[in-house]
Image (spheres, rainbow, N blue to C red):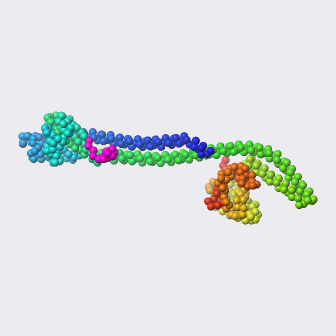
Amino acid sequence: MAPRSFEEKSKPFRLVKYFTFTSLIAIFLGTVILCFLNIHWARTLQFKKSQDYARLLIENLNHQIYTQFQVPVFYLFGKIQLSDKKQFHLMDKVVRNTFHSFKVDLVNLYDTQKNIISYSFDPDLVGKKDLGGEGYLKALNGQYTFKLVQEGNFWEKLLGMPQKIQVITFAPLREARPLTPISGEILGVVEIVQDLSEDYKTIFRFQIRIIISCAVVMMILLVILIFVVKKGEGIIQQRTLERIRLKEQLSRAERLSSLGEMVAGISHEIRNPLGIIRSSAELLKKKMDKTAPMNTIPDVIVEEANRLNSIITDFLNYAKPHPPNFAPCRVDEILEKNITFLDPELEAQGYIIKKRYNGDIPPIQADSGMIYQVFLNILINSMQAMPGGGEIHVDIESAGETVNIIFKDKGKGIPQEILEKIWDPFFTTKETGTGLGLGIVKNIIEAHNGSIHIENRPIYGAQVTIQLPVNRAM
C-alpha cells in the first residue's frame, strides 16, 4: 500500500522534475548551437571586415604606386617595364613599404594583356601565366572579388578552426592622382592574400570559453537541481508516509473502537458467570478438603477461571486502552522494580540481566505503571526466547530529547516471515498466548508519543529498541 501510494502522490513532482531536467538539457544544447552560430556570425563579420580592410589597402597601394613608382618611372625611363631590374626593385620597395606591418602574406601584380604575374612577393611566381582565374577577369572589368580559403580536415573546418584561413582579393590597379578618387585607366590587376588564421582562432577560443562557462553554469544548476529534487522527494515521501501512517492509525482506531465495544459487552457477560464459577469452585474445594483432599478438580477449575479472566483483561487492555496518567518518573527505577519482581524466577531458571546506563538518565513524563507493564512484557518475552537461561542485556541512554531503552537477548531470533506479523493482533507462536501482548506494548508506547522497533541482531538473538520523549508532547 505504501509504495503505490507514494508513487501516486509523487507523479506530479516527477513530471516537474523531468520537465526541469529536459529544459536544462535543452537550454544547454541551445547554448552550444548558439555558440556555433556566433562563430559563424563572427567569421562573417570578420570576412566583411577583411574585405573593407583589403579595399583600403588597395586604394593606398594605388596612390603609392602612382606617386612613388609611376611618375618617377615615366620621368626616368619613359615607360613602365617591370622586367627591368631597377623598375622591379623600385616597385618592390613601394609595395613592401605600403604593406609593411600589415597582415599581408602575398601580393601579386598582373599585367592587363596576358594574365602574367609581373611582380610578386614570391620571386618564383614572377613570370607565371594564367594564375589569376575568374578573379583576374572580373578585376579587368573593374570589379573586386573576395575568396575565403581554408586549409584543414573536415572536422576542423566544421568546428570553425581550420589550420589556416586566408582571404584572397583581386582588384584593378588604376591610374590615380593624389587626393583624388581612384577612377582612372586600369593599369593592371593586384592580388592580395591576407592571413586570418589567428583572428579566427581567437574567435574560436573565445567561443570555447563561452561553451565551457555555460557548461560549468549548467553543471552547477544541475547539482543544485538534483539537491532540490532529492530534498523535494524526501519531503513528499515523508509526508506521504505520514499520511499513510495516520490513515492506518485512523482505520485501526475505528476497528479497535468497534472491537472495544463488542469486547466490553462480551466481557461483562462473561465475567459475571466466570466469577460465580470461580467462587463456587473455591467453595467446593473447601468442602472437598474435608472429604476428598486428593481431588484436584476444584483447583483446575479455579486455575482455568483465572486464566480466562486474564485473557479477558488482555482483550480489554488492547481494545480499550486506558489513557496514561503522566507524571515525572525514571525509567531506570522502573526497570529495577521489574528485575526485583522477576528475581526469583531469574535465579531459578539461570537468567542473568546485564544493565548499562550511559550518562545521566533524565526523568521523563510517563505513566510509570504502564511503562512497568511494557518492560515486564519484553523481559518475559526475552526469557521465553531462551528456555535454557542466558544473558539479557538492557541499555539505557540519553539521546537529547529522548531516552532510549534497548533490550537484547541471545535466543534464536525471530524468523523473517514472522517478524512482519508480530504487531498483528491475535498473532502468536505460543500455545497459550493470546497474541495481544506486543500489541498492548505498542499501544502504550505510542500513547506516550514514543516508538518501538524490533529486529534481529547481526549474530544471534533479537533486539527491542524503545524511544520515549523526555517531555510529553502536548
In the image: residue 199, left or right of residue 331: left
Can the viewer see residue 309 in this picture? yes
In the image: residue 254, left or right of residue 168: right
**Is residue 150 found inside the magenta-colored segment of the image?**
yes
Instruction: Point out residue 322 in the picture as x, y percentages from the top left corner.
Output: 74, 48
Residue 405 versus residue 325: which sits nearer the camera?
405
Residue 108 versus residue 211: which sits nearer the camera?
108
Residue sitting at x 75%, y 45%: 260
Q: Is residue 282 above or below residue 118?
A: below
Magenta residues, start to end: 148-162
Q: Quadrant of residue 413?
A: bottom right
Instruction: Point out residue 169 in the picture as x, y percentages from the top left corner.
Output: 22, 40
Q: Quadrant of residue 403?
A: bottom right
In the image: residue 291, left or right of residue 125: right
Residue sitting at x 80%, y 47%: 267
Q: Is residue 404 above or below residue 57?
A: below
